[in-house]
Amino acid sequence: MVDRNNRPSALKATDAAGPEAQVDIEGTGSSSKVIARLPSGESVEVLLFGATVTSWKSNGGTTENLWLSEKAALDGSKAVRGGIPVVFPVFGPPPKSGHVTSSLPQHGFARTSRWEFLGKSAAEDAAGSNSVKLDFGLSSSELTEEARKAWPLDFALVYSVTLSKESLMTVVNVRNEGQQSFEFQFLLHTYLRIQDISKVAINGLLGVAYTDKVLNATEHKQSDSSVKITGEVDRVYASIPQDTTSVVEDGKPRFDVVRDNLKDTVVWNPWIEKAKAMGDFAPDEDYKHMVCVEVGAVNGWQTLDKGDVFEGGQTIKSLL
């Protein structure tokens, strides 16, 4: 197991006599979702299709922190537009040929597979605040025949979603259960909800090299202390030295995105024309109310040998 810099602090069992988190399963089939609520009102919703987090509310349940398209497919017919889709084992279009992922669709199969809900665990931190962890699993034996044929490797994923009063932690554990090593990429495609994109600055990337996909995948270095969104942005920031990328809105801290054992971050906003061109992005003008800050391991490939485990994720802190 990799030694991770941002492991959560030790938790103690919740007092059985006190209020505990409530966890419910709603819906059937591909529309099934797990909903967890803290006694203080904060909540998280996870669709079993893709193990996609579709809602995270803080401030006693009054503030929605994630953007979800009004036309997002929540019935298992396609990947969800919004929330936090899980990208594995390839980010973006796969290599055209000669790679183990070459036969896969864009962003792989994790976000379009039905995951299993493995259970919950409630806890209390040293300050007395409650938290609840939801675990989801996906393995090679649970893939569709098409996905299994395209990526015939033995693996197991465990995705842990931990809701606390002021934060949401999402961590993926990847295990190689086969006889041969394999390469993969991983990304948490987080859509953060904001009020006005023109007032947003993304900090913590100064001096970091990035690939600009809007400018024909050319290489650049972040020369300004803040990333401002004034048009379509699709950048892969690689090997970021510090752990935290911050979202500031109208001069006030809005989110801290803390990476755990991950070095890369994608910043994305489709802007006007691309938002209109996407059939599941709605309303069209909502590019003004979202920004993607996506942590991952996408600069090159992660290699996992037989029996080895990779673990990485993020903690998003709502600062309102």
Image: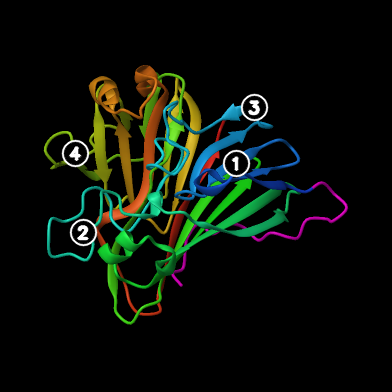
For label 3, the crowd category at 10 Å Cα-Cα, with few meaning under 14, some 14 to 19 and many 20 or more, is few
Q: Nearer the viewer, mark 1 or mark 4?
A: 1
Where 310 sits versus 114, above or below? below
Task: Give the quarter of the figure containing the C terminus.
Answer: top right
Residue 75 visible here:
yes
Q: Tell me the CA gap for discs 2 and 4.
A: 25 Å
Q: Tell me the CA gap for discs 2 and 3.
A: 43 Å
Q: Which residue is mark 3?
A: 62
User: Quarter of the image holding residue 271?
Assistant: top left
Q: Tell me the CA gap for discs 3 and 4.
A: 36 Å
The verdict on residue 5 being magenta is: yes
Contact flag, marks 1 and 4 (Cβ < 8 Å): no
Q: Which residue is mark 4?
A: 212
* Horizontal relation, residue 189 to residue 169: left or right: left
Residue 24, position in %: x, y?
68, 46
Where 112 sits versus 274, above or below? below
Question: Considering the numbered disc 3 on the image, is that residue within a helix, a strand or a loop?
Answer: loop
